[in-house]
Amino acid sequence: MAYVLLRHRDIPDINKIDVYKKNGGFAALKKAVTKMQPVEVTNVVKDSGLRGRGGAGFPTGMKWSFIDNKNWPHYVVANADESEPGTFKDREIMESNPFQFLEGLALASYAVSANTAYIYLRGEFWQLAAFLDEKIAEMEKAGYLGDNLFGTEYSLKIYTHLGAGAYICGEETALLESIEGKRGQPRVRPPFPPSYGLYGKPTIINNVETFTNVPMILANGADWYKAMGTMDSAGVKIFSLSGRVRKPGNYELPFGTTFRQLIYEHAGGVQEGRPIKAIMPAGASSSLIVVDDKVLDTPMDYASVRTLGADLGSASVIVLDDTVDIDWVINKTIKFFKHESCGKCTPCREGNYWMKNLTSRIHSGRGSSEDVDLLLNVAKQMQGKCLCALGEFSTMAVVTGIERFPQDFKKVVKA
Amino acid sequence: MSLEKTYPKEVKQILAKYPPEHKRSAVMPLLYLAQREEGYITKSAMQDIAQMLDITETEVASIVGFYSLYHDEKAGKYRMQVCTDLPCALRGADEFLNNLCGNLGIKVGETTPDGLITVEAVMCLASCDKAPMFQTQGPDGIKYHDLMTIDRTMELIDALKQANKEEK
């Protein structure tokens, strides 16, 4: 099957504007701006069943329809902060198929009548930001961005904005604070960005991969897109596969592909042919799934993964083999979350601090079984009390690790 | 020395990205500019930026403190930032970092005696399928180095040393 998102794997030079154009590029943008009303664009996306690819899986067209048309100007922001341990798909899209992403961003901007869009890239994507600046300039020169597009009234400017090393800025309201020149700390919601976003104006924020789907949906129609994937999760998804597999990397596959197909058919299985002990389907924010045959044959879509007591999130699948100790895993994830907690709300700031003390002590063999109970207690106390998903998700691996892999903790604590 | 005098073109470009009534948004790109020469942000650069954007020096300092790619202390010319998060660690990142430190004769957070390299352990860099990996942060920006071995890393360091000598 031809690629929908990672099209550079079929067409290697698609990051050149002429090649992109020759392969149907910008036809959807031209059609939308010259022949469609903004709301019609939103309706096609709604009908396609596209859901946000950043992790939450919120229906994209519905989000766009929430834009407040009584308050102007509108903004669109691309979330290119890609910082979840285990996620590395947006980087490949932007490096190798940049115009499809930019066209999608332009289509979204037209759909909500925004004349300015920002791409928020994590600071580490420094070279990538410079590369996108070049691509944006090429589009301006070719008349796909700028004033009076295709001779219409519609104008659009796209700018890049670099973060500077803060996982929390992937949270959409923290990201907005960061563009506004403040510390990246989440806002209390509601109000949500479609009514109160950047500079207090209505704003649509989507993940890079989400935008990259849009030109193909406009070009081929909602039904074409819906025919791929499952009832619950339409279309294709890029699965970032890492950990103890033979061929880690990005795999674009229809939703509903099973874990077994991804790991064994596409990625060549586990290193040294070892058995899989656990899977984290959503990066460090993930619950740990105990792996058996039933799990391996579970389709990867939002609803099915939920039946395993986990979430698909941004589909950053980390594979742990039977040599990996879960106390080591949660010590790693909590080190990450303690470092990245923004400090705004107490449960996350203090909770992660104490969880780090406990996971370090337990992993180093100095802990007691009371410490394990305390760690589980702290994690559960945090749940439902944090201001944003970072705090909530920091507890997932801890709670599921202790509850689903008790033997790993019995092994390391002092008698 | 003010940023507007040193980098007039860049400052203008940065300010043009944001609505004039929200020029505070320029604080992050301006801080990158201020960090370019010395690898860290001086107190006077913070004052300069605060003045340019009509915000307080404390507000600028709070941004510097919050984001991990801004530094307020001098370190090596290049910061070698090795990812040791879970996915990289599953593919040998901790051993790589240990061996690198051993080869350079320094600990994590320390700088080589010639002032060229500071080794740091950092959080996920979105290159989990290409571990071990690190980025270098230096005067020419941030660069990724994927699928690294100790041999290739030492070659890179030699090249940086050579380039540094030629500059002087």
Image (cartoon, coloured by chain):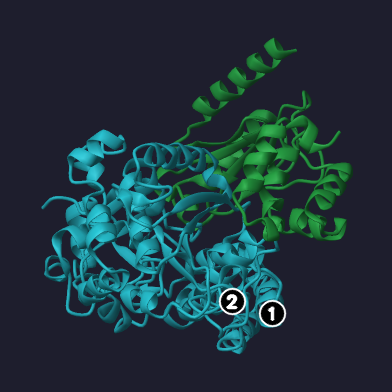
Chain colours: A cyan, B green
**Mark 1 falls on what kind of element?**
loop
Where residue A345 sits, quadrant-wise, is bottom right
For the C terminus of chain B, the quadrant is: top right
Residue appearing at x 21%, y 62% in the figure:
A217
x 31%, y 38%: residue = A15
Separation of residues labelled 1 and 2 (CA atoms)? 9 Å
Say which mark, if any, is on residue B106: none
Tag 1: amino acid: Cys
Mark earlier in primary sequence (1, 2)? 1
Q: Position of residue A182 (x, y in %)?
A: 70, 63
Q: Is A365 or B88 nearer to us in this picture?
A: B88
Q: Position of residue A314 (x, y in %)?
A: 38, 66
Q: How many numbered circles does the render carry?
A: 2
* Residue appearing at x 86%, y 59% in the figure: B56
Q: Tell me residue A85's x, y (percent).
A: 48, 59
Residue A263 in sight from this viewpoint:
no
Q: Residue at x 45, y 55 (%)?
A: B87
When the figure is inspected, residue B39 is found, relative to residue A116, above or below; the finding is: above
- Residue situated in front as seen by the camera: B145 or A182: A182
**Residue holding disc 2:** A391
Q: Position of residue B123 (x, y in %)?
A: 58, 54
| For discs 1 and 2, the disc positioned in front in the rendered view | 1
Residue with the mark numbered 1:
A345
Three-letter code, disc 2: Gly
Question: Residue pushed farthest top?
Answer: B166
Q: Are marks 1 and 2 in contact (CB under 8 Å)?
A: yes
